[in-house]
Amino acid sequence: MVRGMADYGAETILLVGAGRALLLQLADPAVGRGVDEHSSFVGRPVNRLKGTLTYVYAIVYGTDEQVKEVRRRVNRAHVPVRKAGTEASPGYNAYDPELQLWVVATLYDTAVTIIEKIYGPLDDESADAMYQDYARIGTALQLPRELWPADRAAFRRYWDGRISTLRAEAGGVRVGRGLLYPKHTALWYRAIIPPARFLTAGLLPPQLREDFGLPWNHRRQRRFDRTMAVLAVVYPRLPRRIRHWFKDYCLAELDKDLRKNRQPIQRQGASA
């Protein structure tokens, strides 16, 4: 049976890779500078993560109205994230297709990494279906369809080329460290950060662990491997309502916001 993102994309276990995807994005110098100078990510990490995943869930599972709303939200957030370059400091623009490609690429590669650690390697048809599904996440915004690598082999060449030279700069490291070592967030968030930080470190390329100051050694690697092995046994046996709860929650919250937005119009029409 062919399984694509519609089967795997709702899995809450993908949250295990959220830190990896975010740090990979921040390691791109332009993304790191843009987020450092324009984003409230460090002060509102849960809200920003929820916003990103709500966009992904709406594109894959949502109604036309939900898709329109999340596109509007992302476009509005991207408008101020731009800066002209100078000789001393290169510029950035959130609408740059190459940056959008990188962001979607980190989401795709992270999702495949987590799914294969939990469910085992995907067969070729399922892997191809999931790959094409992820193209929709970028092309729903401004990413030109032809910029998304033509197939998984082309993506792997693109990915390996980027990873081989990727090093985080000061702005990206500053944001990443703020997310990994929060100081002014809710107690429950600070409580879950140590295990999240450990899993993020285990999933990152070695040079980015170093850039973001995440310690690693053979003992940590063995502990990471054991943790993923336990998750691979336990998680697939959980009920679907638990495995998909975060997707269902995000879309329900999106629907709630849409209903609130419609109410003033309905009341005005009723009084006319």
Image (cartoon, rainbow, N blue to C red):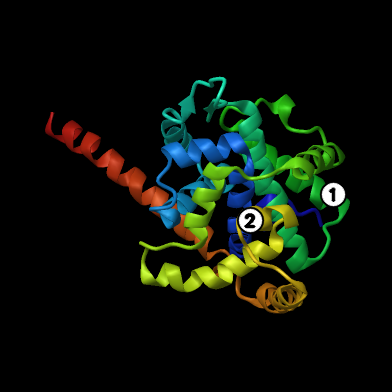
Q: Quadrant of the C terminus?
A: top left
Count of numbered labels shown in the rendering: 2
Q: Nearer the viewer, residue 5 or 105?
A: 105
| Residue type indicated by callout 2 | Arg
Q: Position of residue 101 (x, y in %)?
A: 66, 34
Q: Quadrant of the N terminus?
A: bottom right
Q: Nearer the viewer, residue 55 or 22?
A: 22
| Residue type indicated by callout 1 | Glu
Residue found at x 52% / y 56%: 177
Q: Disc 1 marks which residue?
A: 125
The mark nearer the N terminus, 1 or 2, is 2
Q: Disc 2 marks which residue?
A: 20
Could you give the CA–CA distance between mark 1 and mark 2, rounded to whole angstroms? 26 Å
Q: Position of residue 236 (x, y in %)?
A: 69, 73
Q: Secondary structure at mark 1?
A: helix
Residue 270 as seen in the image, left or right of residue 72: left
Q: Secondary structure at mark 2?
A: helix
Q: Is residue 89 above or below residue 189?
A: above
Q: Nearer the viewer, residue 97 or 271?
A: 97
Residue 163 as seen in the image, left or right of residue 93: right
Q: Mark 2 packing: few (<14 Cα in 10 Å), some, or many (20+)?
A: many
Q: Position of residue 15 (x, y in %)?
A: 58, 61
**Disc 1 versus disc 2: nearer the observer:** 2
